[in-house]
């Protein structure tokens, strides 16, 4: 037990340091900030979810002492509590009547990250609206400076205000999608590290085997339709757009799983995967194509059609 407390405390302190790195204001600090949940996920998956909870408490106390209670609350909401919950779900298992152990599906972990990301998008909207005038003024100053070109008339106040409002409207869905991407990346890295250290308690499927629960496509379509009919500045409108944004990421992950599966055994696999991820990183828009592939996978089950038939006598 003492060892678990020590590991949890170290993970919490590491997470707090990474979380506080953004205060440096440089690219390295921002990069480190994105990996704040990684130590807690490693501790939770490798040593149990209670270890992640210990780390969350220690990290929150460290952040509160260093930067204040409000920042500690942000740490709990965006890093500590989600990491502890995902660790708990990752180690959740049940035994069937025939003695077969069934572990919580990784695809459902993806949906949990989507749900938490959408909720954080709503929190972002609430916080933004509490200081909407200051934020709008700040965006206006930045846009005015960017748009002002020597020899050309500066943009009008109405144009700047319109652009600022557009950026503010994008904050909730973008923050939700970014949080989800970062969390999934940290979860993947944590699982690889724990599996490499031989502490993985459950069989962890490769990316090519990830699937999403039935009904996810219906929720995705409903969120997209609702986003067109509900006011973008209302609570329901922000919720619809945030849900659509995170489920776009979820289906893109499923589309990438199809690519990983279908390129198995191909001599071009490495090159295809490199260009795939470089395209996503540098261009961004291909994520729509992979999300479409993920939607088609849910309907047509491409991977099932390419699997070898089961040997006689097996089910």
Image: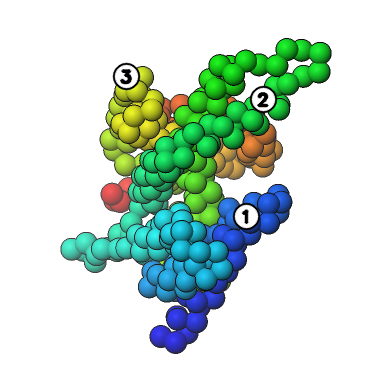
- Asked whether 130 or 279 is in front, the reply is 130
Q: Residue at x 73, y 21 (%)?
A: 148
Q: Residues within 10 Å of mark 1 (few under 14, many from 20)?
A: some
Which quadrant does the N terminus fall into? bottom left
- In 3D space, how far apart are the residues under numbered discs 2 and 1 (Cα atoms)? 26 Å
- In 3D space, how far apart are the residues under numbered discs 3 and 2 (Cα atoms)? 32 Å
Residue beneath disc 1? 22
- Asked whether 246 or 255 is in front, the reply is 246
* Contact check, label 2 and label 1, Cβ < 8 Å: no
Q: Residues within 10 Å of mark 2 (few under 14, many from 20)?
A: many
Residue beneath disc 2? 144
As drawn, the residue found furthest toward the bottom would be: 2
Q: Residues within 10 Å of mark 3 (few under 14, many from 20)?
A: few
Compared to 213, does 294 lie above or below? above
Label placed on residue 229: 3
- Asked whether 297 or 240 is in front, the reply is 240
Which circle, 3 or 2, is nearer the viewer?
2
Give the structural element (helix, strand or loop) at label 1.
helix
Give the image location of residue 227, x and y in percent.
Answer: 36, 24
Q: Earlier in the sequence, mark 2 or mark 1?
A: 1
Compared to 66, does 125 lie above or below? above
- Asked whether 294 or 171 is in front, the reply is 171
> Could you tell whether 91 is left or right of 70 in the image?
left
* Contact check, label 3 and label 1, Cβ < 8 Å: no
Q: Earlier in the sequence, mark 3 or mark 2?
A: 2
Q: Residue at x 71, y 27 (%)?
A: 145
Give the image location of residue 196, x and y in percent.
Answer: 57, 67
> Could you tell whether 271 is left or right of 247 in the image?
right
Give the structural element (helix, strand or loop) at label 3.
helix
Compared to 170, does 153 lie above or below? above
């Amino acid at each position: 037990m003492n060892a678990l407390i020590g590991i949890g405390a170290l993970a919490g302190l590491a997470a707090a340091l990474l979380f506080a790195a953004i205060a440096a204001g440089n690219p390295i600090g921002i990069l480190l900030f994105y990996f704040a949940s990684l130590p807690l996920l490693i501790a939770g998956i490798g040593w149990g979810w209670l270890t992640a909870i210990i780390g969350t408490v220690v990290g929150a106390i460290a952040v509160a002492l260093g930067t204040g209670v409000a920042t500690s609350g942000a740490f709990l909401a965006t890093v500590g509590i989600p990491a502890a919950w995902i660790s708990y779900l990752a180690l959740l298992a049940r035994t069937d009547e025939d003695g077969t152990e069934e572990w919580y599906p990784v695809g459902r972990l993806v949906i949990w990250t989507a749900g938490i990301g959408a909720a954080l998008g709503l929190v972002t909207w609430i916080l933004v609206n509490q200081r909407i005038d200051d934020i709008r003024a700040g965006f206006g100053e930045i846009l005015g400076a960017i748009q002002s070109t020597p020899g050309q008339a500066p943009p009008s106040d109405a144009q700047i205000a319109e652009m600022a409002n557009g950026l503010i409207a994008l904050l909730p869905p973008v923050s939700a999608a970014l949080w989800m991407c970062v969390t999934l990346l940290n979860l993947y890295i944590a699982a690889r590290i724990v599996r490499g250290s031989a502490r993985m308690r459950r069989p962890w499927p490769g990316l090519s085997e990830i699937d999403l629960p039935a009904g996810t496509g219906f929720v995705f379509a409903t969120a997209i339709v609702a986003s067109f009919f509900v006011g973008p500045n209302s609570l329901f409108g922000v919720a619809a757009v945030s849900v659509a944004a995170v489920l776009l990421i979820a289906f893109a992950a499923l589309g990438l799983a199809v690519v990983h599966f279908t390129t198995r055994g191909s001599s071009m696999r490495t090159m295809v995967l490199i260009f795939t991820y470089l395209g996503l990183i540098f261009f961004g828009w291909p994520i729509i194509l992979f999300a479409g592939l993920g939607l088609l996978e849910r309907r047509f089950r491409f991977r099932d059609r390419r699997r070898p038939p089961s040997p006689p006598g097996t089910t």
